[in-house]
Image: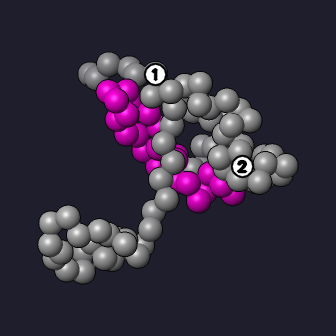
Amino acid sequence: MLPKVQVFAIVGFDEAVIGTALRNGHEVLVYDGYKAEAIAALLEPKAKTLSEYLQNIALDKLGDRAPVFVYLDEDVIAELTSGIREPGTPLH
């Protein structure tokens, strides 16, 4: 059995969880950034962005234990799988 790991979650953002990641040796939750933005707008309409919402709840105080937000980009995925690029070629 694997040991239990403490991760920090943001209350109300359960629908946006897509998994976990390692950040400097700490396991952290990973949220879908687009879903998280929509949830933040519902929870705190005064916050103009997800970043502002996260600042308001002092998420930065968690440092390396703070959750990660991922923005899945279908264009980048298609570009990665559509062909072979020379090493060091930018994705965008």
The answer to whether residue 63 of the structure is visible from this angle is yes
> Relative to 70, is 26 on the left or the right?
left
In the rendered view, would you say 77 is above or below 41? below
Q: In the image, what residue occupies the spot 71% across and 32% down?
A: 57
Q: Does the magenta segment cover residue 35?
A: yes
The span picked out in magenta is 17-39
The answer to whether residue 39 of the structure is visible from this angle is no
> Relative to 17, is 37 on the left or the right?
right
In the rendered view, would you say 89 is above or below 82? above
Name the amino acid, label 2: Ala
Task: List the residue tagged with mark 1.
Answer: 6
Name the amino acid, label 1: Gln
SS for tag 2? helix
User: Which quadrant would residue 85 be assigned to in this image?
Assistant: bottom left
Q: In the image, residue 89 lies at what x, y percent?
A: 23, 70
The extreme right residue here reads 46
Main secondary structure of the magenta stretch: strand
Residue 48: give its label: none
User: Which quadrant would residue 83 be assigned to in this image?
Assistant: bottom left
The extreme top residue here reads 3
Residue 40: give its label: 2
Q: In the image, residue 18 lies at what x, y percent?
A: 46, 49
Q: In the image, what residue occupies the spot 59% across and 59% down?
A: 34
